[in-house]
Image (cartoon, rainbow, N blue to C red):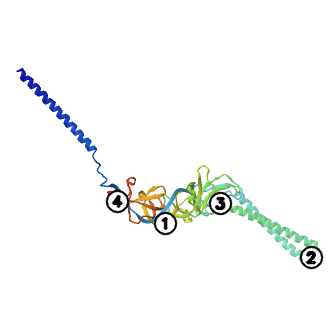
């Protein structure tokens, strides 16, 4: 009986050890298979090739440009100043207002001038009466003198009195004319279409000759001023073509050119101001102080061979592309011309419609097998 119990216990232990062994073996095998799977070859093999996207070489216009933001300024400012000393009665100008030529902006108090003018008119009338009187006296005394009725001195005295009266009349007329001119100058009107940029005096202030009361920027003589960085200054000159455009508004892009490069450079910002004139007809839509994008056209060509910028590899002073043909990448040197953000002009080494790689360029080499992924060709 004891022998049977011992045999049964041994069998149970054997089965237990066997089951444990199977579990260990199975777990180890699964782990091995997983590790082996992780170490297996990638889906892309050298035989399959490197996946790339491609684009076609095209042709068309190209420009090399630099872009800055400029400020609209007036090339001509008008300063309205009084020609007489008088109190400002009304001030119609407001900063920022657009005004048409002939619009009255400042009206001076004319009470004293009106009174003075009326007095001078009376003086002229009196002087004229005096001249008329002495003209008659000269005519009468001349006849009497010729008849011997009066001495020569009496006749000469009459003539002298007439000359004095005529002189007094001229002085009175001159004073009246000056007063009338001053009276006309009590109203200050703008001689140009423009924008009021400064108002220096208001109603109740005393206006004195020569002191500007209102400043108007002539909108028919506008320009754009651009502060050009020191590094870009050598790239431009007077006559360089510039396209001017507003980011908002109804003004269409304007083609102009640099008219002036200021001789001095700002020592703090290291910039130099360049001026670009605007045509007179845009004055109705632009105001001094507006900002405009100034695109300086450094180089341009109407018909060029264009390689996508992302297809180009720079290696020292040489430029390369990878042409894709028959599933192979062919490294090819090109001669570079005009360059912008999107394209490089090819002066040689590639033709229009050639297919070039635009991705994975650093992994390509001459003769490497490639294939297109996704849609492959972008253009």
Q: CA distance from mark 2 to mark 4?
A: 130 Å
Select label 1 or label 4 by which is in front. Answer: 4
Is 259 placed left or right of 327 in the picture? right
- Between discs 3 and 2, the one toward the N terminus: 2
- Between discs 1 and 4, the one toward the N terminus: 1
Residue 99 visible in the picture: no
Crowding around mark 2 (Cα neighbors within 10 Å: few <14, some 14 to 19, many 20+) is: some
In the image, which disc is placed on residue 145? 2
Quarter of the image holding residue 6? Answer: top left
What residue would you read off at disc 4? 328
Quarter of the image holding residue 354? Answer: bottom left
In the image, which disc is placed on residue 301? 1
Q: CA distance from mark 1 to mark 2?
A: 98 Å
Residue lying farthest left? 1
Q: Residue at x 33, y 55 (%)?
A: 51
**CB under 8 Å between callouts 3 and 2?**
no
In x, y percent, where is residue 109? 68, 56
Select label 2 or label 4 by which is in front. Answer: 4
Of residue 87 and residue 309, the one placed in the foreground of this image is 309
């Amino acid at each position: 009986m004891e022998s049977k119990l011992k045999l049964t216990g041994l069998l149970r232990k054997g089965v237990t050890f066997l089951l444990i062994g199977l579990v260990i073996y199975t777990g180890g095998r699964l782990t091995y298979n997983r590790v082996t799977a992780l170490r297996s070859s990638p889906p892309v093999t050298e035989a399959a090739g490197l996946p790339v996207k491609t684009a076609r070489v095209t042709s068309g216009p190209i420009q090399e440009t630099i872009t800055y933001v400029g400020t609209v300024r007036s090339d001509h400012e008008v300063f309205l100043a009084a020609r007489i000393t008088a109190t400002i009665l009304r001030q119609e100008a407001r900063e920022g207002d657009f005004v048409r030529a002939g619009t009255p902006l400042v009206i001076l108090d004319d009470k004293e001038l009106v009174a003075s003018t009326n007095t001078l008119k009376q003086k002229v009338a009196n002087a004229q009466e005096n001249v008329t009187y002495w003209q008659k006296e000269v005519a009468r005394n001349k006849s009497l003198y010729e008849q011997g009725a009066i001495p020569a001195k009496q006749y000469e005295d009459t003539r002298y009195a007439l000359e004095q009266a005529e002189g007094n009349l001229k002085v009175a007329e001159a004073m009246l004319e000056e007063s009338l001119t001053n009276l006309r100058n009590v109203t200050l009107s703008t001689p140009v279409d423009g924008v009021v940029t400064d108002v220096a005096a208001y109603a109740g202030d005393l206006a004195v000759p020569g002191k500007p009361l209102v400043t108007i920027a002539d909108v028919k003589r506008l320009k754009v001023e651009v502060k050009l960085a020191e590094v870009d200054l050598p790239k431009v000159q007077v006559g360089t073509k510039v396209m001017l455009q507003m980011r908002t508004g109804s003004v269409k892009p304007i083609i102009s050119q640099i008219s002036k490069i200021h001789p001095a450079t700002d020592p703090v910002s290291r910039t130099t101001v360049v001026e670009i004139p605007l045509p007179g007809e845009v004055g109705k839509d632009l105001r001094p102080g507006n900002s405009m994008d100034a695109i300086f056209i450094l180089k341009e060509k109407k018909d060029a061979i264009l390689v996508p910028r992302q297809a180009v590899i720079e290696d020292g002073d040489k430029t390369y592309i990878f042409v894709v043909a028959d599933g192979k990448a062919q490294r090819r040197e090109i001669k570079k011309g005009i360059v912008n953000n999107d394209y490089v002009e090819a002066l040689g080494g590639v033709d229009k419609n050639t297919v070039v790689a635009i991705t994975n360029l650093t992994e390509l080499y001459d003769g490497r097998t490639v294939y297109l992924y996704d849609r492959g060709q972008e253009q």
